[in-house]
Image (spheres, helix red, strand yellow):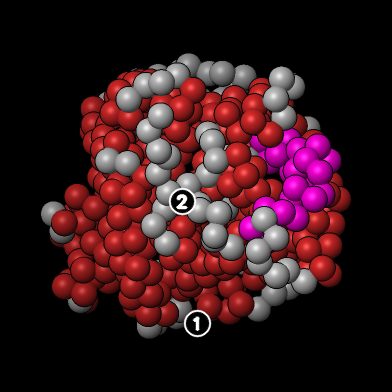
């Protein structure tokens, strides 16, 4: 049997996991959720939810992946042979494929906006002329579909190159570039006149308006952002060698993800305030309002504004790509290991399946806008089912599996690399307590409230 690939180093592991975590969730979803939930208080709750609930689930998924050294379905079969847990594994193979179908549509939008910024569209148009252009673009038939397919093709090409030569290399180059780009945009955004209000909005919490809904949104976002409940962490951890430290890679990933979310907030909110736009304007926030800001800035400083626009949409595109790669890899690992398919053949198959599903999602803003599933358009239905049901269900099942089905000695063994690494007993007891009690209760509340 062909030997299984591993990531090359600890840094490569963190880069790949962080590349998956840092994506549209940080740059597109986080800023608009902050805007809808009143600012800094949401950010504080989001940080706490990440550390107390999401990080323990991340650890649980890493334990399953590294211990089994298999794809999600195979992992459950190895750790609990002949039980119904295999269905949890299958659920986690299907969820990311479901997600990538509409995620690549949004990835396609960022590609289109990058092309528009390269053609200097934002600075050549009067700001008012751009109003409604986002809705106009997504409701077209061919252009968004073509962008979605190009984005998806780029994704599967990287995955087809393999774990080391594709995913690892791409993440190692992309992530540092991404970091530099976000920092540049943040500096630009904070320097805009009137930006201070946006900075204060992000950093000065007012807990008087916090509701249960705010807390659930924050928890849901931290879950989404760390790529939990959909087999990604299990699959990537199965490529982590037995010498690596799971605690270090988990904390490294969570901290980079948090840092990026905060940087993205600092890049976007000050610009939104500087332009006098409502921060709570919803999912269209970055696509709708930032071109307007670039166009307005372009009236005074066309070159700086053009470069800022290009950098901005390039950042979104890179971030989306490193995440969509991880979504596809889950299915590819399953097809190659369980069904004996060649890597490239699995990539072609998944390109066709998710490509077709994505076309339907894309068309649901245009020609298929009349088609409703449970009262929602196809894209919204796909997103709602994934974010509200599939992710939380997957996360809940895995954390229950590690906390209650796997034995404590096995979990300890995985955290200490078979007893070769020292781990403070109190520290392990605390993490195990979070995995066994706190995280399941937190996700169960999220799951039930989402269903309601
Ligand atoms: N964690 C990535 C992001 O925040 O964009 C990838 C991802 C997670 C995509 C969850 C989609 C999803 F539902």
Give left or right: position of 56 versus 192.
Answer: right
Give left or right: position of 387 versus 124.
Answer: right
In-front residue for pair 170/36 = 170
- Placement of the N terminus among the 4 image quadrants: top left
Res 32 visible? no
Q: Position of residue 86 (x, y in %)?
A: 66, 24
Q: Position of residue 345 (x, y in %)?
A: 30, 23
**Number of numbered discs on residues:** 2
In-front residue for pair 167/97 = 167
Give me the C-alpha separation between circle 1 and circle 2: 31 Å
- Residue position for label 2: 20
Residue 412 falls within the magenta-colored stretch: yes
Q: Position of residue 443 (x, y in %)?
A: 76, 45
CA neighbours of label 2 inside 10 A, class few (<14), some (14 to 19), many (20+):
many
What span is colored magenta in the figure?
392-417
Residue 91 falls within the magenta-colored stretch: no
Disc number placed over residue 196 in the picture, else none = 1
Q: Residue at x 83, y 69 (%)?
A: 426
In-front residue for pair 14/313 = 14
Q: Residue at x 38, y 75 (%)?
A: 183
- Nearer the N terminus, badge 1 or badge 2? 2
Q: Is mark 2 within 8 Å of ligand 1?
A: yes
Q: Kindly state the secondary structure of the residue where label 1 is placed.
A: helix
């Amino acid at each position: 049997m062909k030997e299984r690939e591993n990531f090359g180093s600890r840094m490569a592991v963190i880069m790949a996991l962080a590349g998956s975590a840092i994506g549209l969730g940080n740059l597109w979803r986080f800023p608009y959720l902050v805007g809808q939930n009143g600012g800094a208080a949401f950010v504080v709750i989001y940080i706490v939810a990440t550390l107390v609930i999401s990080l323990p689930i991340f650890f649980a998924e890493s334990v399953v992946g590294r211990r089994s050294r298999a794809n999600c379905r195979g992992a459950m079969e190895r750790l609990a042979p002949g039980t119904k847990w295999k269905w949890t594994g299958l659920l986690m193979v299907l969820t990311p494929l479901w997600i990538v179908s509409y995620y690549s549509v949004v990835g396609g939008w960022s590609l289109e906006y990058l092309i528009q910024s390269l053609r200097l569209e934002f600075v050549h148009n009067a700001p008012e002329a751009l109003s409604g252009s986002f809705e106009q673009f997504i409701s077209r038939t061919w252009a968004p579909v073509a962008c979605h397919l190009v984005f998806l093709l780029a994704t599967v090409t990287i995955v087809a190159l393999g774990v080391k030569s594709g995913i690892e290399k791409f993440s190692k180059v992309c992530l540092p570039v991404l970091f530099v780009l976000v920092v540049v945009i943040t500096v630009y955004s904070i320097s805009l006149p009137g930006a201070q209000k946006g900075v204060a909005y992000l950093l000065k919490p007012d807990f008087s308006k916090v509701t249960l809904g705010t807390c659930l949104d924050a928890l849901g976002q931290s879950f989404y952002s760390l790529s939990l409940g959909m087999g990604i962490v299990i699959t990537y951890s199965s490529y982590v060698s037995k010498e690596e430290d799971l605690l270090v890679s988990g904390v490294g990933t969570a901290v980079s993800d948090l840092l990026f979310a905060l940087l993205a907030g600092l890049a976007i909110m000050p610009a939104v305030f500087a332009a006098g736009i409502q921060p709570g304007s919803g999912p269209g926030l970055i696509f709708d309002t930032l071109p307007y800001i670039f166009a307005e800035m372009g009236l005074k400083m066309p070159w700086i504004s053009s470069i800022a626009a290009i950098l901005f949409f390039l950042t979104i595109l890179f971030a989306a790509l490193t995440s969509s790669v991880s979504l596809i890899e889950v299915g590819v690992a399953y097809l190659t290991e369980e069904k004996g398919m060649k890597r490239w053949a699995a990539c072609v198959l998944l390109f066709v399946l998710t490509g077709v599903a994505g076309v339907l999602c894309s068309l649901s803003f245009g020609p298929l806008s009349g088609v409703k599933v449970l009262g929602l358009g196809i894209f919204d239905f796909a997103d709602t089912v994934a974010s509200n049901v599939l992710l939380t269900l997957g996360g809940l099942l895995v954390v229950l599996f590690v906390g209650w089905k796997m034995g404590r000695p096995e979990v300890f063994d995985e955290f200490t690399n078979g007893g070769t690494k020292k781990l403070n007993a109190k520290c392990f007891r605390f993490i195990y307590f979070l995995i066994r009690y706190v995280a399941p209760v937190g996700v169960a509340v999220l799951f039930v409230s989402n269903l309601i």
